[in-house]
Image: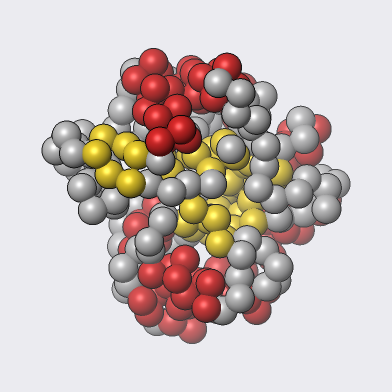
Amino acid sequence: MDLNSDLGEGFGTWQLGDDNAMLDVVSSANIACGFHAGDPRTLLATCERAVTKGVVIGAQVGYRDLAGFGRRFIDYDSADLTADVIYQLGALDGLARAAGDRVLYVKPHGALYNTIVHHEQQAAAVVEAVRRYDPDLPVLGLPGSVFLHLAEEAGLTTVREAFADRGYRPDGTLVSRREPGALLHDPAEVAERMLRLVTDRTLVAVDGSAIKVEADSICVHGDSPGAVAMARAVHDALSGAGVPITAFAGAGS
């Protein structure tokens, strides 16, 4: 199982999360691209640390919304969104290459991630951006999303993702951060949920029902309270059960 986290989300002197500690735990790093978070120096340093620790670099592309941390919906024209995603991919890929590796997968961030679960026009625009930049890049997204469906149709490699520290609705989508039950905080509970996910392919939704969730990668958000402790708990629970922690994309390839 792959473990991923959102990293490089500081800006200037403002630091968010403990990227160094998280890079000791995860196998894949979703590194910001400067649109929702991250300045060039922060992003380069994060890429360098990922390379040093053998963690695969992914581009976390998002809406152009620093003030809202990319968590506010933007009604994009398709051509604008495609160009913005290509721009972000090129920027982070350049920094990753300067650090000694390259971008090896793509994961949308925040509001863009949630929007393209159902929004076909924006999902198609993101797929088009990845296809035009590098059709060999895998894309990470929510199982059953329009985004992954369109990506498969376009010939892209798709990777299904589950969230360790987020609540789920009965339909398999994430509970909005504005609603109760959106965020989980207990490392032991989170680790138990992820072990159940890996062994039984099920999670408990906010209404108490058991839902089927197929996942190839587990995300622990780098900006969540206690993120490192949760990531370590998940890592240790899976490793203790004999589940190897390995990146879905090839490091150094």
Figure quadrant of residue 42: top right
Q: Is residue 156 left or right of residue 81?
A: right
Q: Position of residue 245 (x, y in %)?
A: 64, 32
- In screen coordinates, is 72 left or right of 238? left
Q: Residue at x 20, y 47 (%)?
A: 170
Q: Is residue 26 left or right of residue 71?
A: right
Closer to the camera in the image, 25 or 83: 25
Residue displayed at 83% across by 47% down: 252
The colour scheme used to paint the residues is secondary structure
Question: In the image, is residue 253 above or below residue 126?
Answer: above
Location of the N terminus by quadrant is top right
Which residue is at a point 38% across and 61% down the rendered structure image? 144
Pick the front one: 237 or 71: 237
Picture coordinates of residue 22 (x, y %)?
59, 27
- Position of residue 80 measured from the top left corner of the image (x, y, whole percent): 48, 79
Residue 53 in percent (x, y) is at: 76, 30
Q: Is residue 7 visible?
A: no
The image shows a total of numbered marks equal to: 0
* Residue drawn at point x = 50 percent, y = 39 percent: 218
Question: Which residue is at the front of the view, 131 or 191?
Answer: 191
Relative vertical location of residue 57 with respect to residue 27 in this rendering, above or below:
below
Q: Nearer the viewer, residue 1 or 167?
A: 1
Is residue 3 in sight in this rendering? Answer: yes
Question: Does 81 appear above or below 51?
Answer: below
Q: Is 180 situated above or below 248?
A: above
